[in-house]
Amino acid sequence: MASIVTNAGTGSGNDFESIISAMVSSRKNLLNKRVTVKKAEVEIEQQGVSKLSSALKSFKSTIDNSKGIDVLNTHKITTSQSSNYTAFSITAKSDCSNTSMSVAVNQLAKAESISTKLAADSTDDKGNTVFNNSFEAGTLTISVGEGKTFDVEVSEGDTLELIRRRINTSKDNTYGVSCNVIKTSEGYSFSLVAGETGLDSQNLSISVSNTSGSEGKNLLSNLAFDRTNELEKDANNNYVSKSDSNWTYSAGQNAIITVDGNTLESKTNEFKDQVAGVEIVAQRVSETETIDGKEGPKPYQVDITSDDSAAAAKIQSFVNAYNSLMSTLNTLTQRNTYTDGKNNYDGGDLAGDSQVKALQNNLISLVTRGSADESGLDYYSCGLEYNKDGTLSLNTEKFSKALNDNINAVERLFTDSDGLIDKISDQVYEYTKFGGLLTDRETELKSQSDYWTQKENRNTEILEAYEASLRTKYGNLDSLMASYQTSLSYLSNVISSVNASSKSSS
């Protein structure tokens, strides 16, 4: 195979390189003229579809926060608690009604706990060290109730600090039991706290087994806690530590609050269902006050009123999102201008796109063609306004009046199932869902882009072959012309030599 000439014209001195370059450039322009334009158009459209998809998803995510039953049933809650003492927090649920009540926190929920003290460097009657914080090996079995146990293996020489770590990090400790160790001037305090708050929620106990160790190690049995041996009931039938027990016992307790004189209990500090329409979380026991010579937890006044401004903010959020989307759609579909019949490509990425225009018209139609419901209200009598420039705005005074006159009707129109926001959300979903209109379009555009890329690559191969053929042809021509020039030069030298001989002989 003949080698390809890489610098045509070297032999003959002719500028064949410029000729090859011009011919390749001309062929390239001819081949790629349509491909380049089509590929660029597809890429622009892909960018536009991507922007459209992103805008629609963002729009849907925003407006979905403003739809749903009771979403406009917003309330403002005020309490008489001081700014530097908060006994409880209270939030309104979707079915909350305007009301007033008094709330006092009598008691916070607490988890059951046990603790024991181990003296450092104490000695028995024989002078032997009783506790040196180095335990024999064995197994601690911690129980929080019937069928709820986990084992902790203790190695010889383990300290209380290490045992604490083993308990707290055990993969089998799925009950939330926590261990704490405190070192004091008198020794150590070892305690366990159950993982659940509330009265009788858990029943802590610790048993010891498989013990072994060398002389001088602390007995693991010092950490055993048997409820039968350590506890008894007091006059109120509550468990307390026996007088001779080495353990201090604290029973779990429920949270107790008083609402309008009614006593409510919860195993946690949360009261989610006891008071209709609200959730109360106890945070600290109420301040005390004395009334008629009797001291008790102070009740705080709670007032719950409708919050029209919060409801209006929900609709205003929808209005803002709608206007932003329409602005994006207008920008994407802005038409290109032409000069002498040539496209200037100065419009939007989806200039004049029929699919986007159809979506835009559908959304406008949902807003402008809404009919009144059985109450006689429609979007516009509720304060929604459609402006000449195609944007929406909200008259908050009209909206608040409609809300106060008939909140159920306003919710049906705007936020309830099959309300305006729900209809628009469903319309947008047809475009953004997996397998939806935009997904199909993105797939088709990807195929088109791949096609034109293949055409571009094929044209590159054609141009490379074309350039190679030109170089071969002009290389051969260069060689031929070079040989002619050599022969001509030879003949010229011969003729000059003959002429010189003739002159010298005469």
Image (cartoon, grey):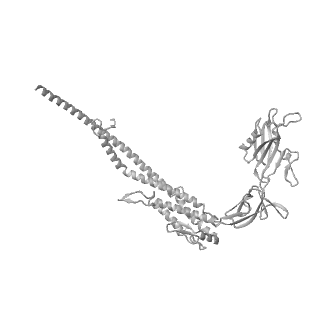
User: Residue visible at 39% across and 51% down?
Assistant: 35
- Residue 427 horizontal side relative to residue 277, left or right: left
User: Could you tell me if residue 278 is visible in this image?
Assistant: yes
| Residue in front for this viewpoint, 75 or 245 | 75
- Residue 200 horizontal side relative to residue 6, left or right: right
| Residue in front for this viewpoint, 335 or 452 | 335
| Residue in front for this viewpoint, 471 or 390 | 390
> Horizontal and vertical percent for residue 374?
60, 73
Extreme right residue here? 125
The image quadrant that residue 92 belongs to is bottom right
- Residue 86 horizontal side relative to residue 440, left or right: right
Which quarter of the image is occupied by the C terminus?
A: top left
Extreme left residue here? 506
Q: How many marks?
A: 0
Extreme bottom residue here? 376
User: Residue visible at 70% across and 63% down?
Assistant: 78
User: Could you tell me if residue 444 is visible in this image?
Assistant: no
> Horizontal and vertical percent for residue 474?
29, 39
Which quarter of the image is occupied by the N terminus?
A: top left
- Answer above or below: position of 185 versus 47: above
The image quadrant that residue 427 belongs to is bottom right
- Residue 358 horizontal side relative to residue 128, left or right: left
> Horizontal and vertical percent for residue 182?
78, 43
> Horizontal and vertical percent for residue 285?
77, 57
- Answer above or below: position of 318 versus 127: below
